[in-house]
Image (spheres, helix red, strand yellow):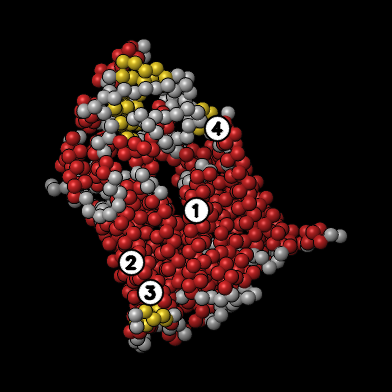
Amino acid sequence: MSADAAILSDGHARTVIATLALLGAAGGAIGTPLVLRRHALLGDAVGHATLPGLAGASIVSISLGGTGREPAVLLGGAAIGAIGGAVMVGLVRRWARTGADAATAITLGTFFGLGVVLLSALQQLDAGHRAGLDAYLLGSAAGLVRADLWTAIAIAAATSVLLAVAHRDILAATFDPTFARVIGRPVRGIGIAWAVLAVTAVVAGMQAVGLVLVVSLLVIPPVAARCWTDRFPVAVAVAAAVGAGASAAGAAASAFAPRLPTGAMVVLALGAAFAVSATHAALRRSRGARA
Amino acid sequence: MAYDRRPVLRGVDLDLPAGSLVGIVGPNGAGKSTLLQACVGLVPIAAGTVRVLGTSFDRVRASVAYLPQRERIDWDFPIRALDVAAMGACARHGRWFGWGGRGLREEARTALAAVGMADLADRPIGKLSGGQQQRVFVARALAQRARLFLMDEPFASVDAASGQAILAALKSLRDAGATVAVVHHDLAMVRDHFDLAVRVGEDALRIGPAADILSSAHVP
Amino acid sequence: MTVPAWTVAVDGWIIAIAALASVACAVPGSFLVVRRESMLADAMSHGVLPGLAAAFLVTGTRSAPAMAAGAMLAAILLSLGWRAIVASCRVERGAALGIAYTVMFAAGVVLVVQAADRVDLDPSCVLFGSLELAPLDDVELLGIRMPFPALLLAAVATSNVLLASLLWPTLVAESFDRDFARVTMPARWAAPAAMSAMSAATCVACFEAVGSILVVAMVVTPAVIARLFTSSMHGMVVRSAIAGIAAAALGHVAATVLPGIVGLHSAGIHDLSTAGSIAVTLGTILAASVLVDRARRRPYPPTA
């Protein structure tokens, strides 16, 4: 049996690849309206906002007598942080009369700063504890278990269902929310549902890919998809496909080279997919101009 | 000129005389904006040449005032009407570096007065009405003291008073010898007030006296 | 309540370094915010990682000037790559930035793992930095001992102010109306180039002092606070420097004093991260400013 086949038949590696493929697909689909709404880097703020949640949850657990490393507790904290980040971006944008980019940057900086403060407290509570949280910073596929695969399946399923049921409303809300609201479509509800999906994808993705790089799952596939098509439903599908393919490739590559972090390999694979797409688009344009 | 694969404008053979007020009309998507953008080098040209004021555009940059459609401006930008108009004076003198600029600001005030915006000079751009904002941009073009003015829908979404002020400013430019080419949707105004009209159609341009070009169109 | 052991030498320099960082960030921060390019600061703080790793790999040490040089190169590469992506695809700038910096960060992680055999390096330290340790990095200039980050930040702050003064009309015009600049200005590459250079230099210099992620808070938040209180560009630059300096002082005081006040000494917590505290203080000042601004804009009740 060749080495490749040996690795792929390893149950854990299969779980990792499948989980990342599903998360990549979901991320690509979820990210497409965000990128089209010019709010691509929301995932960045949400990812960094998980840090105070992680550190805070760890502190709470320790002060209640726990180890401070229980995955369920940490992920719960991460989710709370992520939701807080998503909410704060919206609030800052509205109340500080500023653009999406500044709101994202402010949220990112403030929440991460809070996270660093809490980390410094955590380190003094229990020396050397930060090592546990480092896995969430850059991701660690080694920690993925069956439960994560089920989570990824659930997220992918929820995204597919929402798209299938409400795709016209999603399209309208993406391109002309004012019009959609005026004719009575539930733009607000869709926005909230989509934000929930994005937050869930970020929290699920950060375990494998790390909170710094998780935003790439939401940003790179949609941009690559735009190089292939102009139509929204096709773009969503292509983004999902690119996300799935690149994530699986990255996960497989990091299975072959266990020293290289999964998150980095996934992002490099996504980057390669983007480079191919951009080249295709450039060639198509230059061929067209010569016609 | 072409966007992606499809050429937008074909068979452009256009010669605009000096000292004339030219209206560029045509249906939506015909390529009126593209025509202007090609003249100032914002859009690549698939074939042919553009000669501006007898030479290539690069040489006469400061003598051409281009006023694009207003979509890409951030109205929350912390800037006053006076400062916007002063940019035109900067362009005229080529003074893009360094501090100071009282002379530039004086020229800007004069330009603002020409469009009736003198007393609103110190107002932040975001606190002006749409018509007033547009007048400020026209003032910027005036301050440039250009010989060629290319304006893309300067009358769009502008109230009547601002429209009158802008038209008066354009006419005074024409009288001073400049060439003013304006993309416009109000065919009646073009017929009644402009010298020439350029009709951008499906695959050709027609140029002639405004009254002639527009007699065949539906003009109320 | 125990009074923390303050020393002018250490705590004074900590606040001074943070204050210098605020002054350095005022110009690029204000312009990035009005140009809607705030995320460039975040992108640069991530994108410098391959530069740092390359510096480690090449020099085999962790010397600060080598790291700064490597970071600077990476930041410039990021700027160029980002603009190339925007030019090559019809994609908005935020998404293009996201691609550029995540790919660079991933490459940096791979390099760091390679370098970890030869140099003691932890990727997460890149993200956090340590303002408290900054005063220990002394250099000597004209007979005065000062921390290297302070010197670097003072140099960057000075050069930012000089560059902005020289290029002020260009920067304002190009930031406000890019099409006008493209058509009218002879040196229309000057403003984007200056922005990239200032942002890169500032991010790299601040990174040495406060850690890369917190650079984002110090670049963007003061500018947004300033915008609420002025409607001119130079007013914004001045006020953002003031806001940053205030947050630097308050943040460090809070980090050292708060654990005592809240009674955390018994749990073994004596002081908190100053850099993080400054970021949170900036967020708090922003919240307060927003409230003041909303109160100011509320219309007067109509007279009966």
Q: Name the residue under label 2.
A: C158
- Disc 2 versus disc 1: distance between alpha carbons? 25 Å
The residue lying at 69 percent from left, 62 percent from top is A254
Q: Mark 3 points at which residue?
A: C151
Determine whether C186 is above or below C250 in the image.
above
Where residue B20 sits: x, y (%)? 27, 23
Q: Do marks 1 and 3 both belong to one polypeptide chain?
A: yes
Chain hosting mark 2: C
Q: What element carries label 2?
A: helix
Q: What element carries label 1?
A: helix
Classify residue A230 by image quadrant. Answer: top right
In the rendered image, the residue lying farthest to the right is: A1
Where residue B132 sits: x, y (%)? 24, 37
The residue lying at 17 percent from left, 37 percent from top is B113
Q: Neighbour class for label 3 at 10 Å: few (<14), some, many (≥20)? A: some
Q: Name the residue under label 1.
A: C80
- Say which amino acid is labelled 3: Leu
Q: In this view, does B170 lie to the left or right of C55?
A: left
Where residue A148 sits: x, y (%)? 65, 60
